């Protein structure tokens, strides 16, 4: 039938990319929250939710990396 679109590791690559983006994005939101355009002060970030989402993102990224390594 041919080759699979974007290779055989598409799901693992998507897990790595999306998990990494979720983890890094939420970790950076905790470390350096975005500035409010009106006042110029940092916005209040829900640290609990952001921490959980960062942890979930890193777990998913590690899962994707392990899937790529295992083959």
Image (cartoon, rainbow, N blue to C red):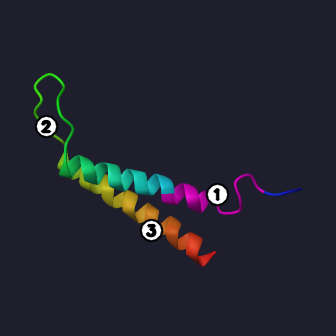
Which residue is depicted at the point 77% across and 56% down?
4
Q: Which residues are magenta?
A: 4-16
Per the image, the residue denoted by label 1 is 10
- Upstream in sequence: badge 1 or badge 2: 1
Q: CA distance from mark 3 to mark 1?
A: 15 Å
Q: Which mark is residue 26?
A: none
- Upstream in sequence: badge 3 or badge 2: 2
Q: Is residue 13 magenta?
A: yes
Per the image, the residue denoted by label 3 is 62
Which quarter shows the N terminus?
A: bottom right
Which quarter shows the C terminus?
A: bottom right
Which residue is depicted at the point 49% across and 55% down?
17
Secondary structure at badge 3 equals helix
Left or right placement of residue 38 versus residue 14 in this view? left
Per the image, the residue denoted by label 2 is 42
Q: CA distance from mark 3 to mark 2?
A: 31 Å
Answer whether labels 3 and 1 touch (C-beta < 8 Å): no
Residue 39 position, x and y percent, is: 10, 25
């Amino acid at each position: 039938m041919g080759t699979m679109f974007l290779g055989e590791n598409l799901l693992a690559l998507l897990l790595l990319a999306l998990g990494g983006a979720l983890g890094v994005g939420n970790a950076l939101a905790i470390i350096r929250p975005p500035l409010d355009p009106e006042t110029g002060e940092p916005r209040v970030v829900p640290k609990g939710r952001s921490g959980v989402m960062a942890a979930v993102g890193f777990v998913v990224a590690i899962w994707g990396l392990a899937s790529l390594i295992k083959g």
